[in-house]
Amino acid sequence: MTTKTQTPTVPEHGETVFIPLNKLKKHPQNARKTPHSEASIEAKAASIAAKGILQNLVVEPETDAEGEPTGCYLVSVGEGRRLAQLLRAKRKEIKRTEPVRCVIDTANDPAEISLDENVTREDLHPADQFERFRELAETRGWGAEEIAARFGFTAHVVKQRLRLGAISPKLMQVYRDGDLTLDQLMAFAITEDHARQEQVYENLSYNREPWIIRRDLTASNVAATDRRAILVGAEAYSEAGGTIIRDLFTEDRGGFYEDAALLDRLALDKLEGIAAQVQEAEGWKWVSPHIDWPHAHGLRRTYPQPVELSEEDKAAYDAAQEELERLSAEWEDADVDLPPEVDQRFAELEAEIERIDGKRHAYEADEIARAGVFVVLNHDGEARIERGFIRPEDEAPEPEEPDAEDGSTVIDGVRVNAHGEVMDDGEHDEDGNHVSALEPEDEDAEEDGKPLSDSLIRDLTAHCTLALRLALGEQPDMALIAVTHALAAQTFYRGGGDAHCLEIRPTSSYLASHADGIEDTAAAKALEDRHAGWAADMPRDVADLWGFIAGLDHASVMALFAHCASLTVNAVKQPWETHKRHALATADRLATAVALDMTAHWTPTVRAYLGRVTKAQILAAVRDALGDEAAERIADRKKPEMAEAAERLLAGTGWLPPVLRTERPAWLADEQPKASALAEDMPDAESAEATEDEAFPVAAE
């Protein structure tokens, strides 16, 4: 008995049928030869999962070589939807036999209707898309994640479109009319304040670059990278009612704090709290918090002095040091990472040693009772605590020293005895003035104990000065001590100018008046630490300074001398100081002599240099450091964008403007310049510009 194969039934043209997914194939005459993107298929899959297939597929039956139907169907219209369902089947969301609603078309040319579907349609205007997304959020209560899941976008893209949908209706209409580009519209979306958006739009000039729009919209705001924002923190600012503006279309590094006055108040409140803690813990007479360093305070500063550790602290220090050395020896050759408990113990021991070391110098109780503390906001957002400042009214009175054997003292030109009574100090002229002691000696006044006249003393000490000059010039080591003493007396002591006999007057130019923020740099901190270290070692009384310096070893005397001399360096160039031409040339020679390397202290940032020069100078810097190719990559940008890109490109290259370059000293002439291989190590465009804005998708999915 022979079994006859049943021929599949072919539906009629125009009939709607449900066909299993695994029976659908791409039509070979489909107009789309470029494959669908993965993002497009993902979006369609998400949409179908949420809402089903909203548009039928158009298919025709597949036939074999003899013209007989195979039971499969070729998709002329809807290939993207077929691929989306296959993706869902692959993810086990549906079965491969899932029925798909299709319309049979055996009358039209498959290539034509496939082309027709894709070219005779108009994408939704982006403005309509943005506003509809916003309506879904407001009317349905859907968040960005839910909308993203229903339309196959990322949550970030949905947030962007929701933000664009919140643009002022007036500006949205301008965008529809073609008078604003999408990039400009995205710039306005940095804030949801319609009045502010419209105000900035009305005040725009012919230059409507997105960066200008963003700049104007955030002109009164504070960047999250600002030291005040770092100190306060986003959470505390928000809890106080502040609003943070975030730019969803560029890298804003934390956004912009909208209320600068509130941020200032919160920062000062926090500094006041820190200052109160310091005062309570340490007992200073006063504390003064400031956001900016009070440059004109004019107060004398004292420094802590060496003190002996207590027996308890000595024992604790020795025990911690001994255990640290034991652990270091035990784990010195370990090839693996330290166990967490060992690593923690190292940290505890180091902290304990540092704590006890901090007790080796301290302020005296009477100084703490008279002096105060400045608590200032540092450039990195941390509180900077500077101690030991004494106001004029709190200065200890200078003791009046007796100048006669009878204990009498001269006060304001009048001699008084030990009981405060005015004493007669010799003869007076007819006007009541004292007769000058500079008159020639009276031969009759040769009594025993009569002091030498002032004129004679002046004569004798002039000879002594001459002899000292001759002798000191023959003893360089002692001359070094004498000069160091003169410099240190005036550098570290109030009224120290009268405590030395060399007519040397060191002056130190105030650099903060020339360069904003220079006191917050690492170099300034290192100099201050060095100064504080010496100040802590100085004897409390300037009268003991000579003995202190004379007792130092030669290397220490040289180090103190170098420190004091360094504070007098002034290489600042001012346009009106034409008389300093030779001094500045000497400064260049000094820089060469000490092999000054400014790359260790300065980098070309937007704030420090690139934002303060012309576009041509920015390009010249990049070309000088990295070559023509790197300069060409940023040549067509607006200045702010060019400066930011240049900062990234120049980072780590060691490039310096000519005014900061130092001629290499002769003893280094045989070494290769540090930047000789910069061109070979030039960063590529991708790594150097990783923070560039991404293109925003505007076409309908």
Image (tube, rainbow, N blue to C red):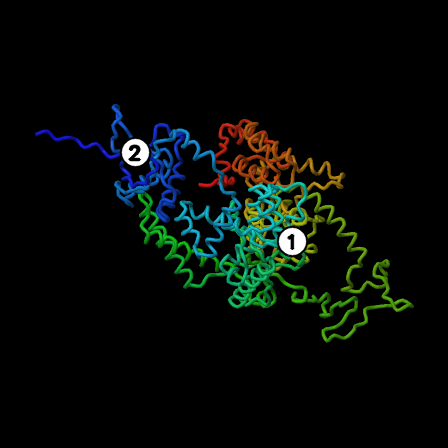
Question: Mark 2 belongs to which amino acid?
Answer: Tyr
Residue found farthest to the front: 12
Residue 650 position within the rendered picture, expressed as x and y whole percent measured from the top left: 55, 36
Q: Is residue 518 left or right of residue 401?
A: left
Q: Name the secondary structure under disc 1.
A: helix
Q: Quadrant of the C terminus?
A: top left
Q: Nearer the viewer, residue 558 or 617?
A: 617
Q: Nearer the viewer, residue 558 or 225?
A: 225
The image quarter containing residue 195 is bottom right
**Does 261 appear above or below 117?**
below
Q: Is residue 440 left or right of residue 134?
A: right
The image quarter containing residue 12 is top left
Disc 2 target residue: 73
Q: Name the secondary structure under disc 2.
A: strand
Residue found farthest to the left: 1
In this view of the protein, can residue 551 be seen by the observer? no
Disc 2: CA contacts within 10 A as few (<14), some (14-19) or many (>=20): many
Q: Quadrant of the N terminus?
A: top left
Q: Which mark is residue 489?
A: 1
Contact (CB < 8 A) between labels 2 and 1? no
Q: Nearer the viewer, residue 632 or 302?
A: 632
Question: Mark 1 belongs to which amino acid?
Answer: Ala
